[in-house]
Amino acid sequence: MSDTLPLIEETIRDLEEKIDVLQGIVDRQKQRSSGYQELSDSFTLIGFDDNYLVGHYHQNMAALEKYFPDVHKAMLEYKPVRYHIDVVDNLPNIRDKETGALVYTQPAFTTSLCQYEEFCLAPKMSHSRIQYTHENPMGFMHVDYLNQLVTASDKFVEESVGGERLPKDVGMMLVFGMGLGFHVELLAINHNIHHLYIIEPDLDIFYASLFTTAWFHVLPLIDERGGTLQLSLGVEAEEFFEAHMSDSSIRGRYNIISTYGFVHYQTKAIAELLEHYKNRYYELSMGWGFYDDAVMSIAHQGRNIHNDVPFVKIAGKTAHPLKNVPVFICGNGPSLDRHAEFLRQNQDKGIVISCGTALRALKKHGITPDFHCEQERTYPIAGLLDDIKDPEFLRDRVLLAPGTVHPEVFKKFAKAFMAPKHGEPATDALESIPGFSDEFESALHINPTVANTAVFMSHALGFRTLYLFGVDLGHQRDGNHHSVHSVYYKADGADRGIYRETDDYVVPGNFGGEVVTNAFFNLSRICIERLLRRRPELMCFNLGEGALIRGAIPCNQEDVLLASGMDKADVMEMATHFNVDSQGASRFEAPYWDCLAPPKVDALSEALLDILQPDVDSRRAGSLQMEEVMERLRDESRAGRPYLNSLFEGSMLYYHAVLVRVLYAPTDDTRCVAAYNELKQIYLDFLRAVPAHYRMHYQRPNSLSLQEGYNDWIVTEEGEGA
């Protein structure tokens, strides 16, 4: 009994301390409530009559005409439909015409002030971070230096406690809901927000803000401070996110690491915007690429050009003689096994395309693909093909792949065609060669999975009727993630543990219901949807049991239109004769290497070092320093050297993402700036190492027969964000 007394006494002391804390909160709330009431009473003395509101409107319209002429034009003749500005008890409000209800149940200004002060005390932030990877089997220089930077930054951020209040300097903020705009005034005037986004899906509400918000003061102030303001007005969820993706590419996607989110009020439309943003947040942090990966693409594309692998030509959008030929694109999803017998019996009635590891599964089922697609660029892909242990079988297939795929993969096929992959320095260099873009187009949405490659290449070869088998991009919870006859499973059906399941998302299923998927497969689905929108002449049918792909019609086996009596040899000859270059890719070799000569990389490395070497004395100066780096890269594109931009950009985004997290850590400004200047030295060391590394590797294809390690580099969320 005596042993428990100290525990009881300690518990009592804890409870007493908690009571004291709670009493303090109650007292402060009473004081604030009294203060807010006094403020509300004083606010009514301003006299928000029609003259006051109309005066605000005219001043705001003049400001919009200067800073946002398109918005000014839209608002000039705008007539509210449902929500109208109103004055109630001498205070401005917004009235819902349909219900008669007021948007603000308390005075709008005091409501906004309460929100603002609560937000300042406990701001909501994305709190994302770059993860440390414990392995670097490919020996990537980017990973070595980034690991050092991540380790140091994590230590600093973990020690940065006690400074949770919204800082004076803010990197990026998203404000959902405009209302009467008093919260926007408080945020913009009291804080130096570098990039401010205001999202209001209802134009009625934004129109009402023109009568109350001091836009005529806020807009010049943001401009004077060198900040940016993006207005997303009257938009639905998808339109908003696509626009935000585009704009953040200009402002610097690395800023998502430390983005504040302020929600003024909740409506169904705003709730949908928030949900959409959270569900697609990962897209902002995927597909950045990095330096070593870019160098590898340069080397592989250059060697494939030297080896005269033909390019596919620009795809025509007019009627094509092959438009009705059915193409069976076979992914390695779990539903492939269910369709195997159908494909085996009907493989002579359509063109069969295997995607990556699906080749092994199809071969086991007695299905012989006509074309085979690959997409990954590292050497292990060649090893996976060797594991099939049938080189003659491979040689008889026709390979379709981006030119960044390893040259040894192309050599395993007697006939192979390549496409210049969009967003690669190798492709940017090719497109800088006079005449290249007249014949060839960069392959957009060709990744991240091989199914994306197959859809693009099918269209490029003139086919317009596509059937997706096993392109599941998702699976039933606790179900198989790939075909059991693929490399991912043993002969007895046991999982080899190669595939790392991270089923982070629940998405609509192709035949109803829901399936689970991860960021990688979900992005593949989105990219296929984008490609189908860009190619409306494609008729695409989805027999998969995974994710619904918008633009691809759900389809059962009995609905597949087969081509009886088709001469496959003639079809394939026609496809390649009209749609593949016959003049020899090697004609581009000399100008390709001229574009990518090491002295150009030396000069840009030196220019970036000159920008980054000076220490900064404020958060804003650090942010501007990183923006100057990105602007210097864009200068290369404007000067006709986009390949230098894309060579450096991916790694810059990663390094900046880590440094932004340090720069805007929730602690004292002085500590953050000092840490930024200190950790930046690792970044500088990376840039100093680039010239020698580039000279050694830019013409040397990757030769490591190890599993890829760079896919470990992802941005993860630590908190809810907005």
Image (spheres, rainbow, N blue to C red):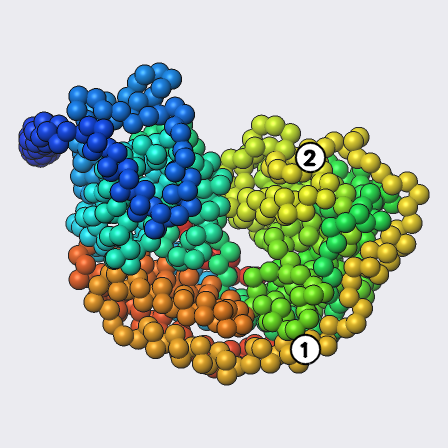
Viewer-side residue, 154 vs 252: 252
Q: CA distance from mark 1 to mark 2?
A: 42 Å
Viewer-side residue, 178 vs 407: 178
**Quick one: label 1, few (<14), some, or many (20+) residues within 10 Å?**
some
**Quick one: label 2, few (<14), some, or many (20+) residues within 10 Å?**
some
Where, by quadrant of the figure, is residue 23 drawn?
Answer: top left
Q: Is residue 281 above or below residue 29?
A: below
Q: Earlier in the sequence, mark 1 or mark 2?
A: 2
464 to the left or right of 655: right
At a point 46% along the width and 43% down the height, the residue shown is 241
Residue 655 drawn at (x, y percent): 38, 64
Farthest-out residue, bottom:
599
Can you see residue 26? no
Residue 572 drawn at (x, y percent): 85, 55
628 to the left or right of 5: right
Residue type, numbered disc 1:
Glu
Farthest-out residue, right:
565
Residue 213 drawn at (x, y percent): 25, 38
Q: Which residue is mark 2?
A: 553
Where, by quadrant of the figure, is residue 115 drawn?
Answer: top left
Q: Which residue is mark 1?
A: 589
At a point 60% along the width and 60% down the height, the residue shown is 422
